[in-house]
Structures are given as C-alpha cells and as structure tokens.
Image (cartoon, helix red, strand yellow):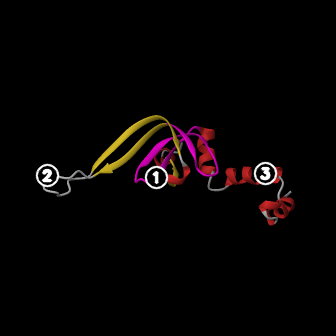
C-alpha cells in the first residue's frame, strides 16, 4: 500500500479523484500539524491558541476544518492591558481574562495552537 500512496501523492491534486483527496486529507489530519486539533477533539483536551489580536484562548475544540476555523467550548480568553495614568504615562501591565462558553474562531486569526502545556506536564 505504501507504493500506492507514493504514486498518488506524485499526481497533482487537480487530477486526483475525490476518494484520493479524502484519503490524503484524513492522513494529514491524523499525522500532520492538524493532528493537534484532531487529538483535542477525540480526547476532549484543552488547547492554547495564540491569536493575531494579542489574545490567548484556552479551551476545548469541538470541531475544526483545514483552515483552522474552530468551534470551541469553555474558553478562557486572556490578554494584558497597560492602563494610562493621568499624565500620559503608562501604568503597570494588568492581566485580564474572560470566560466564553461557546465560540466560533475564524482560522485567519490563529497564529499558533498548542496542547495545554499544564496537562502535558502532568502526564495527561
């Protein structure tokens, strides 16, 4: 079967059948970079997502697609704000967070997706 896989990948995607494309996509989802999201959906584990708006999201992935569009649950959104004092000086940075029970995240705002570092360290 490896020979068949190698032969099908040498063919341009435009010439592949829907079945061949589906097989390649399934393989990429289970072994490629998107496997982090696949495992999160299967095991209901948390991921940490770094977004383009300088916010971090810690939550569980319910569904995703190849563009990294995601449906997330039990999300904690985290960011820092630097308040300005009365004389235009910057104050001390303050960590802020917000809980969101269900959210759709558009993939073009995603920079990085990590498995929950604390759960990985604990051996879960």
Magenta-span inclusion, residue 87: no
| Cβ–Cβ under 8 Å for marks 3 and 2 | no
First in residue order: circle 3 vs circle 2: 3
Residue nearest the viewer, comparing 4 with 84: 84
Mark number, residue 2: none
First in residue order: circle 1 vs circle 2: 1
Q: Position of residue 107 (x, y in %)?
A: 55, 50
First in residue order: circle 1 vs circle 3: 3
Magenta region, residue range: 44-73
- Determine whether 111 is above or below 118 in the image: below
Residue tagged 3: 23
Camera-side mark, 3 or 2: 2
Residue tagged 2: 86
| Cβ–Cβ under 8 Å for marks 1 and 3 | no
Residue at image position (46%, 43%) is 58
Q: Main secondary structure of the magenta part?
A: strand
Q: Position of residue 65 (x, y in %)?
A: 63, 47
* Secondary structure at numbered mark 3: helix
| Mark pair 3, 2: CA separation | 61 Å
In which quadrant is the C terminus drawn?
top right
Residue tagged 1: 51
């Amino acid at each position: 079967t490896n020979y068949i896989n190698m032969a099908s990948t040498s063919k341009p995607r435009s010439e592949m059948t829907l079945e061949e494309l589906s097989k390649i996509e399934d393989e990429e989802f289970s072994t490629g970079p998107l496997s982090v999201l696949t495992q999160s959906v299967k095991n209901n584990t948390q991921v940490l997502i770094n977004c383009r708006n300088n916010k971090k999201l810690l939550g569980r992935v319910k569904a995703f697609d190849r563009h990294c569009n995601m449906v997330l649950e039990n999300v904690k959104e985290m960011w820092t704000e630097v308040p300005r004092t009365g004389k235009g000086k910057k104050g001390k940075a303050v960590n802020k967070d917000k809980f969101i029970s269900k959210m759709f995240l558009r993939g073009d705002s995603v920079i990085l997706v990590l498995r929950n570092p604390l759960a990985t360290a604990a051996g879960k």
